[in-house]
Amino acid sequence: MSTLRRIGLAAGGVLAALGAAGVVAETAHTRRRNRLRGDIDRLGSLRGEVRTVVADDGVALHVEVDEPAQSAPGAPTLVLAHGYALNLDCWHHQRAWAREAGIRTVLYDQRSHGRSARSDADNATIEQLGRDLARVIAETCPGPVVLAGHSMGGMTILALAEERPELFGDTVVGVALVATTAGGLNPGRVLAPFLPRDVSRQLAPRAVAALSRVPAAVDIARQRGTELGTRVVSRFAFGDAVDPAAAIFVDEMLAQTPFEVLAEFFDNFGRLDKFTVLESLAHVPTVIVAGTLDRLTSVGHSRKMAARLPTAELVECAGAGHMVILERPDEVNAALDRLLARAGEQ
């Protein structure tokens, strides 16, 4: 037998072994997903009074309102804004806590996300998200408001503060910025975390642009719910202790967001620069929450915002990642509780 033939047979054997290992891994993953299905579905099980808020460009936003049986007169409404590629269900633990505490809560799906209608590509901007939030507040909140935003939801709040600073201190009486940033983000680290910073910054936009030409094929691959997909989510969205059900829950949520939507919003993150907007929050009780192992918006971003806003409370959740709202719900809820108490004293 020739040397070339032996090499070919060996390579074929390696590929066959890898393929078999992949089948075994995916089979185990499917079994684990099925075993955890009850816990996964529970994380997206809470529903409220459904309303539709129409944005200023005509996009219909899916909104849910949780009305408590009793609430203190003049108590603020808690409005929760979710992040990139997620939907309002990511706030499950905060929503459950608010219900138990009797806090009126408003949640909504950002445009093109979840159950909300698709946006034109030209309006897939952080600034438009800020205007959407203003419309949600105007139509669902009859009194004072405390805003909480996770990741892109935090950027949404800053966009609102930039365009409507007069709302902060009167209508908006408290702000929580969770696992987010006001700027300086390199989104390429999400797609190419092991490349040098300058290389990844240049590569990511090109990769997204190339993939956006075949979004249907990308979505088919994303929606398979593979072991690899869940591992990537566990690695980059979570910290040191990953709940398997929560990781699959987030993986499925991400897969439900069309790749075209991801591509349309992607360029926003590299351009974001709203540090000067933080001045609008100086007279409003504010809490900044971060996971110390956040690989997407690192704790350094939160510390930089806190340095620009010395009146804010900085809460660092040790060992938590970007999905700190799912990983450390008790710490996040306690921070929101303190914020609401401070807002009520205004």
Image: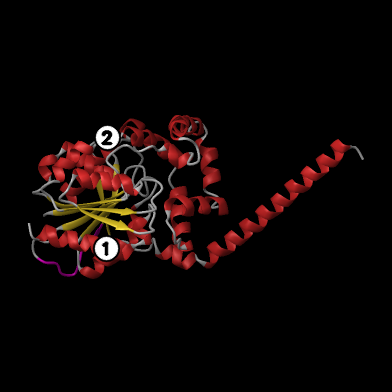
Depth check: give the residue in front, 325 or 101. 325
Choose the circle earlier in sequence order: 2 or 1: 2
Whether 121 is drawn above or below 53: the answer is: above
Residue 273 shows which numbered tag?
2
**Residue 126 figure quarter:** top left
- Using the rendered image of the protein, determine whether residue 151 is visible from the camera's viewpoint: no
Q: Amino acid at mark 2?
A: Asp
Q: Is residue 137 left or right of residue 169?
A: right
Q: Position of residue 195 (x, y in %)?
A: 50, 37
The residue carrying mark 1 is: 333
Bounds of the magenta span? 65-72
Secondary element at image label 1: helix
Q: Is residue 199 magenta?
A: no
Front residue of this view, candidates 7 and 129: 7
Image quarter where the N terminus lies is top right
Query: Where's residue 242, x and y in %?
Result: 45, 60
User: Does residue 121 sit above or below 54 in this rendering?
Assistant: above
The quarter of the picture where the C terminus appears is bottom left
Kindly identify the residue that appears in the image at 18 percent across and 69 percent down.
69
Residue 119 occupies which quadrant of the picture?
top left
